[in-house]
Amino acid sequence: MMAAFILVCSVILLLQFFVSYCRSLIAASVREQISQEVQEVTGMTRPATEEEFARVVQLLQLCPERPEERGEISLIRTYFRMLGVIRSTIARVVPSLERWASTERGQCTHFVAVVLGRRIAFSRNLFAQQMGG
Amino acid sequence: MPGLVEYVVWSLCTLLEAAVVVCALKRGAFRKYIFLNVYMAASVLVSVVRFDILHQYGLTSSQYVYFYYYTDALLTIFLYFALASLFSCVFSEMHAEQYVKLGAVLLLCGTALFSYAVVYQSQAKLVTHFVVELSQNLYFVGLVLTYVLWGAVLKLRETRTRLIQLVLSLGVYFSLFAANYALRNLYPSMNSVLQFLPPLFACFLPAAWTYAFLRIPEDARLAPARLAVIR
């Protein structure tokens, strides 16, 4: 009985903490504009939509990786998938959740687009250094 | 003996714990978050000694089992004080540090007494049982306290991004461990699968804290109301 109570409490609190933590990662990128380059490469609209997420991630994987971004990208991808699960399950019963999940997934796309912009700039610098050296 | 995957996860976790201390020193945040860093430094030390004992005596030896559970309880107490120090940071402007310290010590003593009472009623009145019981109870108390702290962050409109991320990652960490302990109690037959999860969960906290020290400047601010799931 006690273990079941702890399990239920922990899962509910885990979801709350995880969502808030992912939002805190995304929050910093929300203020950043998506670069012109990224918009041209991806053909993204403003504001970013959830449908564009997979395409931006594919492009992200083509760019040389910056080690410090590896963890946060995996976490945001997990968050994006989790929101997808929420939308296709609980949101069918609670319609307001669908709009919320959709907005959140759009912000995840914005986040990866900002990272893509940084990676393009990083690759440019790397290329310029090699040419210079 | 643990397999290759277990060794890789263990090494990764130890490296990440060391990275927290290095990044905090590099960013000049070591003293400000001294208890968090002491906990991480102690974790690295314990990891190295555990590895040495494992190789000398083996996984099933009483030396390793005793050392593992005693240091686990000690580390949980360190983490508990790290959490209390985060309370102090959040309540610093209210000059309530003394009350926070007193409350933390009283709660720790209360949890220890409760754990002792549980063990005292059981048939095997072993000190080791007390150590395991204390560790498990502290994880759940830690989870509840982190939730209270998160509530205080929202209520007091705390805006320091680094502090917010430290609190939230601690919340995720405690919830993962508390859920794992509860699942193991509910379904003992799943122990063989569930026992592989804690080392993976253990990597999350040092990774998140390394990120917070390395990438988030001390003066970065955000509106905590934007992060709340329930308003």
Image: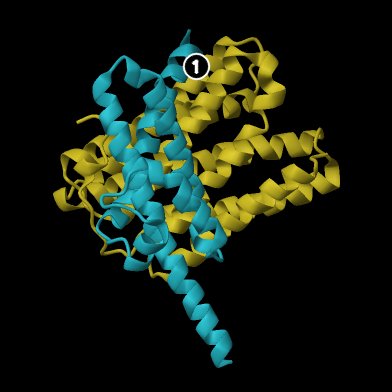
- A4 in relation to A98, above or below: above
Q: Is residue B39 visible?
A: no
Query: Residue B104's spot in the image, x, y percent?
Result: 34, 38
- Amino acid found under the numbered disc labelled 1: Ala
The location of residue B34, given as percent across then percent down, is: 41, 58
Q: How many labels sit on residues? A: 1
Give me the residue at 64% from left, 35% from top: B69
Q: Decide if residue A112 is in sight here.
A: yes
Q: Is residue B8 above or below residue B2?
A: below
What residue is drawn where x is 46% and y is 69%?
A120
Q: Classify residue A115 as left or right of residue B164.
A: right
Q: Please identify the quadrant where the N terminus of chain B is shown.
A: top right
Q: Residue at x 54, y 92 (%)?
A: A132
Specify the quadrant that holds the C terminus of chain B: top left
| Chain where mark 1 sits | B
Q: Which chain is cyan?
A: A
| Circle 1 residue | B117
Q: Which chain is yellow?
A: B
Could you tell me residue B165's position as x and y percent?
Answer: 35, 49
Q: Residue B80's x, y, as percent? A: 43, 40
Q: Nearer the viewer, residue B145 or A47?
A: A47
Q: For the residue carrying disc 1, how many other residues have a C-alpha within 10 Å: few (<14), some (14-19), or many (20+)?
A: few
